[in-house]
Image (cartoon, rainbow, N blue to C red):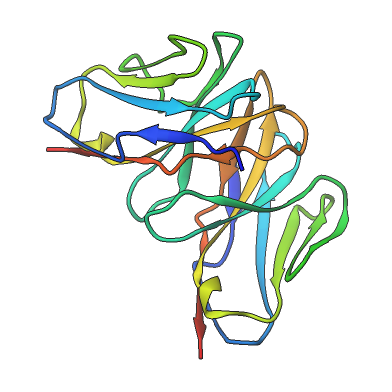
Amino acid sequence: GQNIDQPTEMTATEGAIVQINCTYQTSGFNGLFWYQQHAGEAPTFLSYNVLDGLEEKGRFSSFLSRSKGYSYLLLKELQMKDSASYLCAVLIYNQGGKLIFGQGTELSVKP
Amino acid sequence: EPEVTQTPSHQVTQMGQEVILRCVPISNHLYFYWYRQILGQKVEFLVSFYNNEISEKSEIFDDQFSVERPDGSNFTLKIRSTKLEDSAMYFCASSEYRDRGDEQYFGPGTRLTVT
């Protein structure tokens, strides 16, 4: 079975830092993606990790530990527009690549 | 920047009717996908497609569903006899590779409402 867990919702203050955690247990692993999704819109790509460690991309960083089945997304200098759902997804390649998504973490940024 | 497009943006249909959702993937991409998201739930994989064949499909993708690449640009999802529970947002995605870190680019989605 495939299991990807992330907190349902989080609240943070504008200008602060927030860390969104994701744990996974999947039948395969070819990388972990983080997507941002605003209500009623498509997921948009934020970051990708396939090796252990930290990947930094502007205000966003993502960390992966494959041995622990754990990742986090770090958002710095939060802005109101960062209020959205953040989706953790594992890429699994068998015959074809597919993304297995977690439930998503609804982040509310308050002034 | 190239993007995946989908039509229509919203489709309303009656239970039992056939619907076809259309997608135009990014032109140099070779791998195509359909996902769905029921309101308030997670994004779910339906099917992946490469070289005019289904590469993989989920349990959701039963005999009521089919995909096709009728020409060099379009990629379609057909639901033969819609059910109430098919109401969802359907996202098409495409990627240049399937097993590397290349991101899957998502289209804006088609909201399907079955009444």
Residue drawn where x is 64% and y is 25% of the image: B29
* Residue A111 point in image, percent of width and height: 51, 91
Residue drawn where x is 84% and y is 51% of the image: A67
* Residue B27 point in image, percent of width and height: 59, 24
Q: Is residue B19 left or right of residue B102?
A: left
Residue drawn where x is 55% and y is 9% of the image: B53
Give the total number of marks visible in the rendering.
Answer: 0
Residue drawn where x is 55% and y is 72% of the image: A82
* Residue B83 point in image, percent of width and height: 20, 30
Q: Nearer the viewer, residue A84 or B42?
A: A84
Q: Is residue B83 left or right of residue A18?
A: left
Residue that extends furthest to the front in the rendered view of this protein: B1
Q: Nearer the viewer, residue B55 or A77?
A: A77
In the figure, A45 relative to A29: above or below?
below
Q: Is residue A64 left or right of residue B34?
A: right
Q: Quadrant of the N terminus of chain A?
A: top right
